[in-house]
Amino acid sequence: MENPVIDLKGLTKCYGSLKAVDELNLKIEKGEIFGLLGPNGAGKTTTILMMLGLTEPTSGKALVCGIDATTNPILVKRKVGYMPDSIGFYESMTALENLVYTGKLNGLPEKEANRRALDLMDLVGLGDSARKRASVFSRGMKQRLGLAEVLIKRPEVIILDEPTLGIDPAGVKEFLSLIHQLSREQGLTVLLSSHHLHQVQMVCDRVGIFAAGKMQMEGNIHKLSQTLFAEDSYSVGITVREPLPASWEHSDELRNIPDVQGLRITENLVQIACASDVTPDIVRFFVAKGLDVMGVHKREFGLDEIYQKYFDNNLIENNAHEKSRSIFKRYVNKK
């Protein structure tokens, strides 16, 4: 990554003896959606504040669009749109008036601010509500209006801090789909901070597991899965028409297929653990043996499994570890 849009170098923030952010190194490229995943209190918001120049790092640098956020915070703010977890509007003003006011604060002439505001209201699905007062907006509508407010100055980067809190599931899906669309169509770089695993997985190109002030792991889902499930990165289930005996005569031959690491037979289902995706070779093997293949099921390791496996491996110590596990368990139990 030669010219990252976001480049954090050894970023550290201390409050007395507490290290809220500890030697954070992270590069995010143009047009990428990066998910900063971690429990409340992990240091995500502190990291964002340093990226915006709203708090100074104890050490290290936060470069955004090539600009040092500590020495040139105003230049960074011109390039970055920030949407916090709680958004406030002038409730006596209409949605359109709120957007135009924000546009004018960002140096836009009133006519241009009005034109952009109307276009953005249509883009985020609020075109019919432009002249309604913000006071009557639901939480989901305010989040959409907040996104329009972020976009009115046409930023190169948008930072979203827990943007889906309090939105119903259908609203969350629509909001995240909009984020994905904007990133792909406009080349926007997006940093999405959240502790909601399935939401991060829906839209992010890469994710970073952030806990106890440290970036514990980062990469795409496939990379994280390979790291944590190295001996069982792929799992393929083959369903056949007729039941097979537990001591199937072709078991050893099946194990000899490159990267097949083990298998388990349960009547009509053969579950095969592999080091790489050799599903085509496995299917050809069963067909060559004259068996009727009724179904092929590839197991995918999602963020839920990755997150839980990560903590099960005891990669984080001390009280932050226990806090993270507790929050994660509560999240899973609510699903």
Image (cartoon, rainbow, N blue to C red):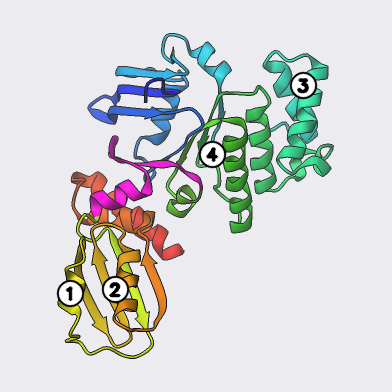
Q: Which residue is mark 1?
A: 253
Is 30 colored magenta in this rendering? no
Give whichever of discs 1 and 4 has the lower sequence position: 4
Taking depth in this image into account, of 279 and 82 the one nearest to the observer is 279
* Residue 122 in sight: yes
Q: Residue at x 58, y 16 (%)?
A: 78
Q: Which residue is mark 3?
A: 113
* Residue 322 in sight: no
Q: Which residue is mark 2?
A: 285
- Say whether marks 3 and 2 touch (CB < 8 Å): no
- Say whether marks 2 and 1 touch (CB < 8 Å): yes
Counting from the top left corner in percent of width and height, residue 258 is at 20, 61
Determine whether the residue tagged by mark 1 lies in a helix, strand or loop: helix
Q: Residues within 10 Å of mark 2 (few under 14, many from 20)?
A: some
- The quarter of the image holding the N terminus is top left
Q: What is the residue that sits farthest to the top in this orientation?
A: 71
- Amino acid bearing label 2: Phe
Label 1 – label 4 distance at C-alpha: 56 Å
Counting from the top left corner in percent of width and height, residue 304 is at 37, 57
Taking depth in this image into account, of 44 and 254 the one nearest to the observer is 254
Give whichever of discs 3 and 2 has the lower sequence position: 3
Q: Which residue is mark 4?
A: 85
Q: Residue at x 80, y 31 (%)?
A: 118
Report the magenta residues as a range.
Answer: 203-228
Counting from the top left corner in percent of width and height, residue 201 is at 45, 50
